[in-house]
Amino acid sequence: MSRREFGCVIVGAGVAGVSAVAGMRAAGFEGSILMVGDEPQLPYRRPTVSKELFRGAKTPDQVRIKAESWYADNGVELRTGTRAIGVDLDGHAITLADGSSVGFGRLLLATGGRARNPWSGNRVRSLRDIADAEGLTTALDGVDHVLVVGAGLVGSEIAASLRSLDREVTLLEGAELPLPRLLPPDLAHRYVALHSARGTKLETGVEVTEVAEDADEVVVTAADGRRWAAGLVVVAIGMEPDLALADGLALAPTGGISVDWRGQTSVPGVFAAGDVASRPSSYVEEPFRAEHWQSAQNHGTAVGRAMAGEDVRFDEVPWSWSDQYGINLQVTGWPLGADQLVVRGELDGEAFTAFFLRDGVLRGAVTIGRPADVRAARLLVAQRARVSAALLADPSVGVNETVEA
Ligand SMILES: Cc1cc2nc3c(=O)[nH]c(=O)nc-3n(C[C@H](O)[C@H](O)[C@H](O)COP(=O)(O)OP(=O)(O)OC[C@H]3O[C@@H](n4cnc5c(N)ncnc54)[C@H](O)[C@@H]3O)c2cc1C
């Protein structure tokens, strides 16, 4: 079989892959592009999977990243429902699940990841994609009580969505507080109160060692012997980057495919972007792998530009959000690396912003109800601005007016 040749092949039809196309075309790349994605749908907004899609407030057609016509308009051959199963780095080709192979000039791995779930069973679910959401919705039929393992961003959102679907929810978290990788303790306490106010039973310090199901229920056992039984368990203990095609590429000690400032891997002409890529950052001590929508989007765009030959140095201040119980949380920068907390408003009030400083320099901010503060703070974090704590605490002073000379 003669193999088809493409100027660029993108594996993974998530936001990083789609944004890379936009970046390449904006930078003037005129070659042919093939994008393969193993999910059957057109690329969609994954964050809706634990929110609007799961609650039934939106359909898959309403959460597409781009209209169907966009791909042809941008000269992309999009093959959904198609998994790439091998890469020949020397021969510049990838193998698809049907056994065919296609050649590439440049390759982008934007394969994201899979939900981590060491347990299995019909009553044991996880949530990463539309198929998971549909399966979970079916499995919920006739189930009153659900256990959610993991109170990180996704687990907390699942708990909130389940409450809106009138299910009894017990949320089990290994750390002492929810959202342990996102929020410092002062703010995480706010989420303890929120879960409680909305009827989610939060249990912390729970190291789950066993999940076992029978015909009627599933039982979760913790290392200290505590047990919980319910009709269904949803495991939300993070994701694993999909490294199935990363043989021969350098990997980061922290997980993910190692890339440089332009998104290039250890092999020239082969790039990685989005959740699967471990990249340098001047805002975070380690090379890090972001697992956030906007980061995947902007990284994808930048790497696409680099693939088109532009001189790119992607070094963005992180920004992410979470919606739980109708409350929007926004986080920018690196709050966990700070030594001083300054609060504008009241932490237990309707609206507040918490600013995080290290040695007097603004490192990050978290807000509920004051998104403009986070937008302004993000610019100051990028400038490594030294700020006045007294002015930051004063809501009548604009965030950008708090910079010290
Ligand atoms: C339930 C959920 C809720 C979230 N909510 C938020 C939120 O509120 N805010 C926020 O900032 N972030 C959120 N995120 C994170 C955000 O969705 C991700 O950071 C983002 O989707 C990563 O984009 P990506 O393109 O790198 O990877 P992905 O979105 O994972 O896309 C990768 C695609 O590649 C496909 N693929 C993998 N391997 C192959 C292969 N070999 N062949 C073909 N296709 C392949 C995968 O199936 C997938 O479709 C959430 C994530 C989840 C799972």
Image: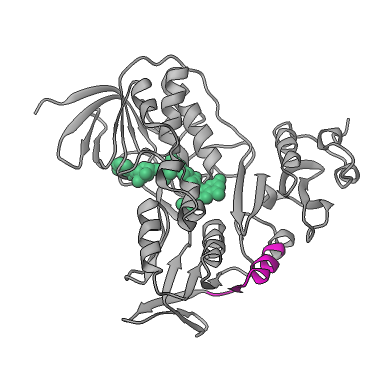
| Front residue of 91 and 347 | 347
Whether residue 277 can be seen here = no
Q: Residue at x 58, y 37 (%)?
A: 281
Count of number-bearing discs? 0
Picture quadrant of ligand 1: top left
- Compared to residue 340, the image places residue 142 above or below, namely below
Position of 336 with respect to 213 (left or right) is right
Q: Residue at x 64, y 39 (%)?
A: 283
Q: Estimate the x, y position of residue 216 in percent, counting from the top left.
A: 35, 82
Q: Which quadrant of the rendered structure holds the N terminus?
A: top left
| Front residue of 51 and 394 | 51
- Compared to residue 144, the image places residue 177 above or below, namely above
| Front residue of 111 and 60 | 60
Q: Is residue 224 magenta?
A: no
Q: Estimate the x, y position of residue 323 in percent, counting from the top left.
A: 60, 53
Q: Quadrant of residue 96?
A: top left
Q: What's the image's color scheme?
A: one colour
Q: Is residue 205 magenta?
A: yes
- Outermost residue, bottom direction? 225
Q: Estimate the x, y position of residue 365 in percent, counting from the top left.
A: 72, 46
Position of 343 with respect to 86 (left or right) is right
Position of 300 with respect to 188 (left or right) is left
Q: Residue at x 49, y 49 (%)?
A: 48
- Compared to residue 14, the image places residue 161 above or below, namely below
Q: Which quadrant of the rendered structure holds the C terminus?
A: top right
- Compared to residue 2, the image places residue 164 above or below, namely below
Whether residue 334 can be seen here = yes
Magenta region, residue range: 190-206
Q: Estimate the x, y position of residue 181 in percent, counting from the top left.
A: 60, 56
Q: Residue at x 54, y 38 (%)?
A: 295
Q: Quadrant of residue 383?
A: top right
